[in-house]
Image (cartoon, helix red, strand yellow):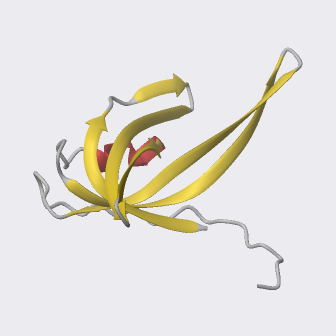
Amino acid sequence: MNFEFKGQLIEKYDTIQVSDKFKKREFVLVKTEIVGQQEFTDHVKFQLTQDRCNLIDNYAVGNELNVFFNLRGNRWEKEGKVSYFTNLDVWKIEGATSVNNAPDEIPPIPTEEDDLPF
């Protein structure tokens, strides 16, 4: 499934080489909504992986961004203990302002289709 989120860039981290075959880069967007009389603020951390790690390079803290991402979940087991992780894997970034107007799009990762009737 593909999702979309709009918010302001507030954190941008360096690329981390996790293993010989895997690297990632994280960034955080903030979005504030007013519902009735209450204000709600969400801080959402996204992940870029492999050849997509540079997609955030053209944007500075404070830029308004629109990110397109896939929801990914992983199971990890070590010493009999099982943990689950959820990642928001970004495949495209668009912004209202950028340092460089180079193309930001890399096609989405193919996803498996569900057999659900809806």
Q: Quadrant of residue 107?
A: bottom left
Residue 62 lies left or right of residue 71; in this view the side is: left
Q: Nearer the viewer, residue 90 or 21?
A: 90
Q: Position of residue 44 (x, y in %)?
A: 43, 46
Q: Residue furthest top?
A: 79
Q: Residue at x 43, y 26 (%)?
A: 16
Q: Nearer the viewer, residue 36 or 55?
A: 36
Q: Position of residue 35 (x, y in %)?
A: 39, 65
The quadrant of the picture occupied by the N terminus is: bottom right
Q: Quadrant of residue 27?
A: top left
Residue 98 lies left or right of residue 91; in this view the side is: left
Q: Residue at x 18, y 52 (%)?
A: 63
Q: Nearer the viewer, residue 84 or 35?
A: 35
Q: Residue at x 65, y 65 (%)?
A: 111
Residue 4 sits above or below residue 24 on the image: below
Residue 61 sits above or below residue 98 on the image: above
Q: Position of residue 80 (x, y in %)?
A: 89, 19
Q: Quadrant of residue 34?
A: bottom left
Residue 105 sits above or below residue 48 on the image: below
